[in-house]
Amino acid sequence: MKTLLQPFHLSRTAKKSIQKHLPRLKTEHIHPYRIPVSCPDISEKEERYVRLAMESKWISGKGPYVEKFEQLFASQVSHTKYAIAVNSGTSALHLSLLACNIGPGDEVIIPTFTMIATANAVRYTGATPVCVDADLATWNMDVTKIEARITKRTKAIAPVHIYGLPVDMHPIQKLAKKYGLWVIEDAAEAHGAEYRGHRVGGLGDVAAFSFFANKIITTGEGGMITTNNKKIAHVVRTLRGHAFTRDYHFWHQYVGYSYEMTNLAAGVGLGQTERFRTFVAKRKKHAMLYTKLLHGIPGITTPPQLRGYVSANWMYGVLVDSTKYGVNRNDLRMILAKKGIETRPFFVPIHMQPPYQLASVGSYPVSEKLCCDGLYLPSGSTLTDDEITYVATIIRKTQK
Ligand SMILES: *Cc1c(COP(=O)(O)O)cnc(C)c1O
């Protein structure tokens, strides 16, 4: 067993293949970008709450904003009974998994096309992440490929609503019922998204949100767990703060964690949640404008739009088919960077990550295609229509 501080190495052939597909974009000299890929939307409201929290001297995990933020989040955003704030989206995932009693020897099914934290949180519990390929039509996990990966050790399915678009949850709910599995939503990118009239965060047994600076609402670093399960809520509340008991000071029945959200961060979160509706509306407007302006460019695929689904429009991604567009994804990124436009490539799938490649079996062609062809454009509520038009115009002009 490796210790955590030993890096994982790639075989020489794997390294070559990664260098070929994922060359480093040497854009350091371009900073600062004229249009950053994402910028937090912070107002005086958040500044005021932070100031009030400072003045009250309640700056750690105890303090009125934590509870206020949780209550508003639960009622307004996820429509769940319980919301528990923590210090990151990854801690939210970790505690959600622990609350479902997932540990060594267990398997958790995740999409391979996701951000690394989904897999890492599974690994923290001692369980093994089992990957499923993506669906090219949605960029989300291919729900038809889940059942084949279920074994006697499978304890949970953890769908991720990629870039803000909900996963098709009905088939997952059905499988969970058939095999007695937990459903843990990674809703880090999908704050406010809806699936067949229901908000994400309440579609499984428990869900995790992230409030990293580029997420739909931010607290700097932070996360939230939502659930309708009273027992899960209780376990999560206990574990996030060292598992202190009410009965006796400094006596602990569980190995707890130091995962609490500070009252300062919760002040920011409360302000953000009060402004949440405008964020959603702006993101929707921006996505519609991008889609309109990019429509019909050969070789450019805009984000999937599905009936019955409301995306949270976290990041506006496109796929570049170089045979039709005439320029590949990496060159397009460089051209945009030279014009002062910051972009990001799509996620590198989990099965290609050094700490996980050995554990994974099977083939994941769709995720690898997304990884090679996808990039996301400047996104977020602070963008202007002029900026979006500028980006789209360059993409159109670059086509050969
Ligand atoms: C951002 C993100 C996380 C991790 O959130 P942190 O708050 O950065 O820990 C987890 N899963 C997904 C899918 C994410 O996008």
Image (spheres, rainbow, N blue to C red):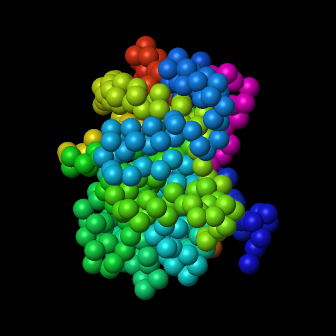
Looking at the rendered structure, the number of numbered marks drawn on it comes to 0
Say above or below: 163 vs 111: above
Going by the image, does 235 lie left or right of 6?
left
Residue 315 point in image, percent of width and height? 45, 37
Which residue is at a point 40% across and 26% down the rendered structure image? 275
Give, as a single range, the part of the protein colored magenta.
Answer: 21-33
Secondary structure character of the magenta stretch overall: loop
Say above or below: 38 vs 364: above
Magenta-colored stretch includes residue 386: no
For the residue pair 152 and 266, the one nearer the viewer reads as 266
Going by the image, does 219 lie left or right of 173?
right
Which residue is at a point 79% across and 66% down the rendered structure image? 6
Residue at the far right: name it. 6
Q: Is residue 349 visible?
A: no
Which residue is at a point 33% across and 78% down the rendered structure image? 180
Say above or below: 168 vs 155: above
**What is the quadrant of the C terminus in the image?**
top left
- Residue 339 lies in quadrant: top right
Residue at the far front: name it. 247
Residue 73 point in image, percent of width and height? 40, 41
Going by the image, does 57 lie left or right of 198?
right
